[in-house]
Image: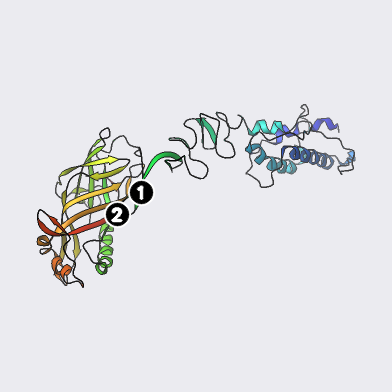
Amino acid sequence: MDRRHVHGVLVLMVMAGGACKDDAPSAPEFCSEMNRLLCHKLDECDPDEGIDCSESGDFPSLLRCDPDDRWECDEARENARECLDDLEEVPCNEFPLAIMHEERSPASCQAMACPQPAGTEGGPCYGNGTCDDGLVCASHRCEFGPATGTEGGACYGNDTCNLGLDCLQGVCVVGTEATFGGCGSAVLVADPLALPSLAGHAYRFDLLALSKPLPDNLVGLVNPVIADQIAAEQINLLLVIDADDRGAGTLSARLGTASRREQGVAGFRFDAQPESIEYTLVHGRIDSTRDASLSIAIAMGEEPMVLPVQALRLAGALSADASEVPVGRLTGAITVEDAANVNVPLYGTLKALLEQQDPPVQPDTQVGGKDAWTLEACFTATTVTLQ
């Protein structure tokens, strides 16, 4: 067998795209190991040749190995070990000795692994997830766009961005963390909404947790009841967006109770038409600009407990795709006069319940000159359809 026939076997066999290996060789090591493997393969396929592949043997190198060779990209280095493993598994009847090329270094493997040089347009990103100036690393390839770490550009490999920016879904954005009292916080971004307009969108509360004015010993009893009734669609609070003036940063929206008019039919309708209120929309945060009122009915015993909330304000953060409100807060007040007419099992009225606590829960605010208790509640909401 003419040993020159193995020149260029490397070109055919390195096309396998293996996963990254911890023992990936350097380019010179790869070339030397390829020479050793080719020798053993020739000996296996034509044992009559009597080839000596030992270190003391006289078998000449079939590939030119330059000690200064370097992999052109991480992918070539990562594929090198699998390139060798694949070649070792090739049976003799498929061993491509008939393919002839000039003697070459592992540059041929690099060319196949790196159709474009690393860091350039269309080429793989550098090992640290960056590209040349003016390009961004997207799906492990370099494309034109804002630089990594800058606004609109890809996040760094550790999910961070330059000072003043936050990493949101792999992209660097202007971020501000907003808190919503005891309801939690959210990172608000400059333009998080994938939709140009929210007009016609409806959000149903899928969580409502009261805090004030209930004492702690009752919060743990009432909130699980509310959660069960929301899941059973007995309590349905809707926030419906009527208009979206993105340029002015405002929304017009209605908040009220709703129900399904027909069982099994998708969508909800308001039970009564609530008043439309203007909201601000800043960095994905919505805040009502004036007071509203809302009655929340909770089934407790034979008669529902209806909470007549006045001076109601809503604040919340929209998700980036505007599909949900992951954190929100309601604040308002229930006057002492109204609390005297709210039915509560065992206590008779909400007023009596609050006054009979030890110590009594005192009114802490006023509405229209009348003493009142502050109401606070946390909520989350998801989009639903309307009938």
At label 2, counting other C-alpha atoms closer than 10 Å, the crowd grade (few under 14, some 14-19, many 20 or more) is few
Q: Is residue 233 visible?
A: no
Residue found at x 29% / y 54%: 181
Residue 86 % position (x, y): 70, 42
Q: Nearer the viewer, residue 120 or 151?
A: 151
Residue 352 % position (x, y): 14, 69
Q: Nearer the viewer, mark 1 or mark 2?
A: 2
For the C terminus, the quadrant is top left
Residue 280 % position (x, y): 25, 41
Indicate the secondary structure of the residue bearing disc 1. Answer: strand
At label 1, counting other C-alpha atoms closer than 10 Å, the crowd grade (few under 14, some 14-19, many 20 or more) is many
Residue at numbered disc 1? 186
Quarter residue 71 falls in: top right
Amino acid found under the numbered disc labelled 2 = Gly
Indicate the secondary structure of the residue bearing disc 2. Answer: helix
Residue at numbered disc 2? 181
Q: Is residue 290 visible?
A: yes
Asked if labels 2 and 1 touch by Cβ distance under 8 angstroms, the answer is no
Q: Nearer the viewer, residue 365 or 351?
A: 365
Query: In the picture provided, is 170 more to the left or to the right than 249?
Result: right
Please tell me which of labels 1 and 2 falls first in the chain: 2
Q: Which mark is residue 147?
A: none
Quarter residue 49 falls in: top right
